[in-house]
Amino acid sequence: MKLDFDRILDCRSTEGTKWTTYPEDVLPMGIADQDFRAPQLIIDALHARVEQGVYGLQTPPRVLSDLIVDYLAHRHNWEIVPDDIFYLPGVTDGLSLACRAVGKPGDHVLIQTPVYSPFLEAPRKADQVPLFMELTRTESGRYIVDFDQFEDTITDRTSSFLLCSPHNPIGKVFGRQELERTAEICLRKGTVVISDDIHCDLVYSGHTYIPIAKIDPEIAANTITLVAPSKTFNLAGLKFGAAIIQNKTLQERFRQSLDMLSGFPYHISVFAFAGAAAAYQHGEAWLHEMLPYLEHNRDTLHKFVSEELPGIQMRLPEATFLAWLNCRAAEFPTTPADFFLEQARVGLSDGAIYGDGGKGFVRLNFACPRSVLMKALMRMRRALISIQNDT
Ligand SMILES: Cc1ncc(COP(=O)(O)O)c(C=O)c1O
């Protein structure tokens, strides 16, 4: 059956944070949730779980681990075993739990900016100290890692490095050589890689996501990878994530770190388990239709920005449904995000929240019906033209 991603849903009535953040006349294109209905088979699985009528604390279902193992093997060619999986109430929690598991209070955590803003706070939640280094932006707008700087920034107390792969907000899919070099330096320096791979299913044609832990067993033993079906299948409100850890010592340390979560032992929502199991088991057919729709949105957006939004530059994201718009040449009287909010009534994420290197950028979420994307772009164009006419 052909799915209808053009259909406009009444997202505001769900009181989604993406929507309630702004007044009603604003088109929200910020927070990284989709405006699409989740796959029907996930909705059916949630209905079935509701029908069971018993919602007591639930032990992680064994079948879920098997489903994740199968999914990662066939979708990403990555072999893990069920015991490598630790369930979490979300990937963001996993970042600080992982920092805590691999380091001591006061240790340093290396973070490349700009990056998904909760990365910036994760070390402090583990009583650790962030060390920031900026990704290098080339003239064409491509981002690369300065590996000499990367190595020099790592101190004797840098117990972990937070990688975002694929990368939010810049949309980069790291290549094998970049991942190998990153892993090799971290191994040599005794720094564990904590890799947030939540966007790994949302990769566009011509690009391949490689889990850093897959590169070789020694690297796997020095890595904690965080995954979730939430970005892929629009399930963030179910609050589910998983850490993949293939080293027994790190597994034990992560287990101890989980004490930080409330409850003894902590539990995951019964609906998170039901939704995640259905996503990993049945979600892919939906994803096969959704990804080309997203890719078309991405290309439409890119063309529009290049041709119709003077002063704004965008590189094609290789993954994610997030576009990273460079507004530095547009010389707005306020921040670009404030400008588009006030003058275009379009809500975008302010690049400054992603740390050094993000100022003068906005992040635009294009996981919405194409007509909504076009409406937002028209509004942005009108606002841009009006200030150009004023000057
Ligand atoms: C890179 C990255 N990590 C984590 C999250 C959020 O994960 P969770 O809702 O599971 O905490 C997001 C959400 O956009 C993200 O982009």
Image: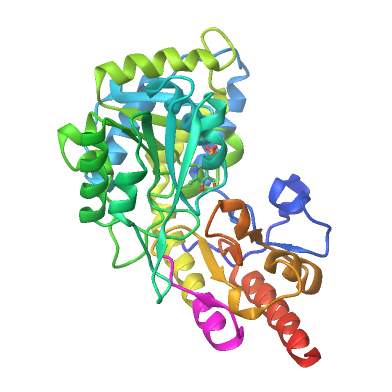
State how many labels appear. Answer: 0
Taking the image as shown, residue 299 lies to the left or right of residue 190, namely right
Whether residue 274 is visible, yes or no, is: no
Taking the image as shown, residue 22 lies to the left or right of residue 109, namely right
Which is more toward the observer, 39 or 114? 114
Res 204 → quadrant: bottom left
Whether residue 178 is visible, yes or no, is: yes
**Residue range (magenta):** 300-317
Taking the image as shown, residue 221 lies to the left or right of residue 114, namely left
Is 308 contained in the magenta span? yes
Q: Where is residue 206 in the image (x, y as percent from the top left)?
A: 29, 67
Q: Residue at x 56, y 59 (%)?
A: 358
Q: Position of residue 198 (x, y in %)?
A: 44, 44
Q: Where is residue 348 in the image (x, y as percent from the top left)?
A: 67, 62
* Quadrant occupied by the C terminus: bottom right
Q: Position of residue 124 (x, y in %)?
A: 56, 30
* Quadrant occupied by the N terminus: bottom left
**Applied colour scheme:** rainbow
- In the image, residue 228 above or below residue 63: below
- In the image, residue 247 above or below residue 232: above
Res 388 → quadrant: bottom right
- In the image, residue 11 above or below residue 388: above
